[in-house]
Image (spheres, rainbow, N blue to C red):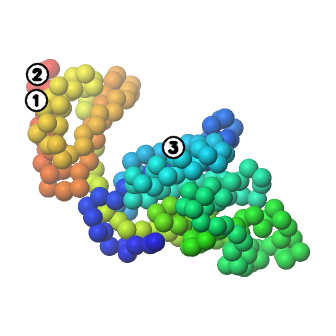
Amino acid sequence: MTGSTEGQSDIVTAAVLVIGDEILSGRTKDKNIGYIAEYLTMVGIDLREVRVVPDDEAEIIAALNALRARYSYVFTTGGIGPTHDDITADSVAKAFGVPIGEDPRAIALLLERIKPEDLNEARRRMARIPQGAELVLNPVSKAPGFWIGNVIVMAGVPAIMQAMLDDVAPKLVKGRRMLSETVRADAKEGDVAAPLRDIADRFPDVLIGSYPFSDETGFKTNLVLRARDAARLRTATEAVIAMLAAIRVQQA
């Protein structure tokens, strides 16, 4: 279920499945996707897809089964609290075809924070874990997430999600880390598009993106290059710098 901290492949992929009506309605603004994306990039895992689904069992199961078949890992956020609409755990269990019930390990964790007399039916819902899953520890509020197959189920509250991600990170199989360089172009995006395409064609193993912005002097462009091979990244970056120098000479 878990993997070593040593990369076994150049590329390890992931998806994020965000679960919750409140996200889709706009009542809650998601703060987890960007954090997870940056976190995974830093440890050598490529986030390839993000989906948002409502608190609907059929939709959760369909999305989960599609994503877990396609990517190395699926991280879910939301829907593991004590209320009636927190149905993520049940949906994951059905997706894997396993029973779900109160887990003594989870009950013990809850009792570290909750008095036995206060462990009511609603709170006990947070101890329902699919059979065969490992617990994902939550030092913030003790209610655990879980890990089954290649699916890691975490809370939607950002502080708790971040703590859970820290717990699972050492157990993840990691790929070769993506490196990046950013070159500022004091030119409009349209001015660099054609020569940038030529460089992209010369370096198919380097991902090159252009991101326009403006400052007090007008429109500019940040050129971001990403690759796993440091030497190729450096060579492509030098080509971009030379291209920008040539444009400045032409415009002088």
Asked which quadrant contains residue 144, the reply is: bottom right
Seen at 84% across and 76% down, the residue is 115
User: What residue sits right under mark 3 in the picture?
Assistant: 51
Can you say which quadrant of the picture contains the C terminus? top left
User: What residue sits right under mark 2 in the picture?
Assistant: 250
Seen at 59% across and 44% down, the residue is 59
Query: Which residue occupies the foreground of this view, 75 or 93?
Result: 93
Seen at 67% across and 45% down, the residue is 55
In the rendered structure, the answer to whether residue 109 lies left or right of residue 118 reads left
Q: In the structure shown, which secondary structural element does the residue marked by tag 1 occupy?
A: helix
Tell me if I can see residue 183 in this picture.
no
Tell me if I can see residue 101 in this picture.
yes
In the rendered structure, the answer to whether residue 179 lies left or right of residue 83 reads left
Task: Estimate how packed mark 2 is, as few (under 14), some (14 to 19) or many (20 or more) residues with alpha carbons within 10 Å.
Answer: few
User: What residue sits right under mark 1 in the picture?
Assistant: 246
Q: Name the kind of residue labelled 3 in the image.
A: Arg
Residue 37, percent from left and from top? 44, 51
Q: CA distance from mark 2 to mark 3?
A: 45 Å
Q: Is residue 215 above or below residue 229?
A: above
Q: In the structure shown, which secondary structural element does the residue marked by tag 2 occupy?
A: helix
Query: Which residue occupies the foreground of this view, 252 or 152?
Result: 152
